[in-house]
Amino acid sequence: MTTPLVARMREFGTTIFAEMSALAASTGAINLGQGFPDTDGPPEMLEAAREAIASGRNQYPPGPGVPELLDAIAAHQARFYGIQLDPRSQVLVTVGATEAIAATVLALCEPGDEVVTFEPYYDSYAATIALAGAVRRTSVLRFPDFAVDEASLRAAFSARTRMVLLNTPHNPTGKVFTRAELELVCALAREHDAWVVTDEVYEHLLFDGLQHVPVATLPGMAERTLTISSAGKTFSATGWKVGWVSGPAEAVAAVRTVKQFLTYVGSGPFQPAVALALGLGDEVYAGLCGSLQAKRDLLVSGLRAAGLEVAVPWSRMRRRWAPWTRWSSAGGCPQSPVWSACPCRSSTTTPRLPGRWSGSPSARPTACWPRRPPGWLGPAASAERCRGLGTRGWGLGWGTRSGDAPV
């Protein structure tokens, strides 16, 4: 009997995040391979979650999201970017940004459609594009400045381009796309009548005075842009899995049609807590970012003292994990789909996450890059135990495995 896993997913296997976290746990090492913080978010937000649980908000929330969170997301977009949204028709709450990405790609792409993205990329992009039966087209961002290569980007577009999947601020490089770069992307999207889906989960984690430019604010782009973000990165609550997508009502409705058959709903008691957090003062947002910048600076100093080349150019943003480094050893990391023999794999003190590279081996950079973890799109087989426990709104489920069958 052949493997039960469908052909289009066989190249993906176990995520590198699970592998590196297990390695860190088995060795007692510091884990810089997974993008979760070592501190909790704002105390007001945590207390709001406790209150929601205690007050009985543990059942299924409304499919689009609880009303106060929909209102808070719309208010956030207006407050920070001047984007006006109808919270009831132009906003959808998802189980983290990863589900928003998956639901959006599955809703908008037919088999054979092409999706343009920048490489390296968050690894759920490739898997989700494969699930949709679409074709991945990439333009490479290269060390050390990761500037957009216009010729490469133009070559990635074709008559079959359906979508541009754009991440800014960018994971894993930390690049903040400039307005000029974004305008080039938008011009090509308009030329090819393509959607632009923007993953903006790091929108508030910018260092050194940089400014984030949402694609939806650029001329002629509001009607063809779906914007994705989440509370996990901004408010240091990655386990809550509260994300959202916003944009044109018709497109959001399409995403909702798919999303309802992925997780249906989730994160019930955490949604009102995130609604409160989004409305916190500017000083809270600045404090979260300032704390991370100080940690970035400390880590960069230590890596450089250890003899590593670290890129922190003007267009950089870093989070809780290691900055982008270039290994000083000759030849860099081995040429394998996952750099299994790279120094961070064998270290017993600070394992860092090796990257995946889908381009040609000769083009692979001699660097290891960390990336944030993918969200869980749902169990292989959802158990009904949550009904008996009265926690259906939490969005918890699980699968079982028989032998070596994937789950």
Image: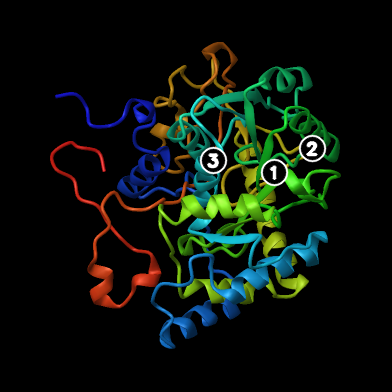
Spatial separation of the CA atoms under disc 1 and disc 2: 10 Å
Specify the quadrant of the image occupied by residue 330.
top right
**Are there few (<14), some (14-19), or many (20+) residues within 10 Å of tag 1?**
many
**Which element type, helix, strand or loop, lies under badge 3?**
helix
The quarter of the picture where the N terminus appears is top left
Residue 134, x across and y down, in percent: 51, 29
Residue 297, x across and y down, in percent: 69, 49
- In the rendered structure, the answer to whether residue 172 lies left or right of residue 106 reads right
Residue occupying the point 66% across, 47% down: 318
Q: Which numbered marker is on residue 182?
A: 2
Q: What residue does disc 1 label?
A: 168
What amino acid does circle 2 point to?
Answer: Leu
Residue farthest bottom in this picture: 55
Disc nearest the viewer among 1 and 2: 2
What amino acid does circle 1 point to?
Answer: Thr
The quarter of the picture where the C terminus appears is top left
Q: What residue does disc 3 label?
A: 105
Q: Which numbered marker is on residue 185?
A: none
Q: Earlier in the sequence, mark 1 or mark 3?
A: 3
What amino acid does circle 3 point to?
Answer: Val
Nearest the camera: 99 or 296? 99
Residue 179, x across and y down, in percent: 84, 40
Nearest the camera: 164 or 110? 110
Are the residues tagged 1 and 2 within 8 Å (C-beta)?
A: yes
Specify the quadrant of the image occupied by residue 402.
top left
Nearest the camera: 172 or 48? 48
**Which element type, helix, strand or loop, lies under badge 1?**
loop
Residue occupying the point 59% across, 80% down: 44
Is residue 201 shown to the viewer in this render? Answer: no
Q: Earlier in the sequence, mark 1 or mark 2?
A: 1
Residue 94, x across and y down, in percent: 51, 58
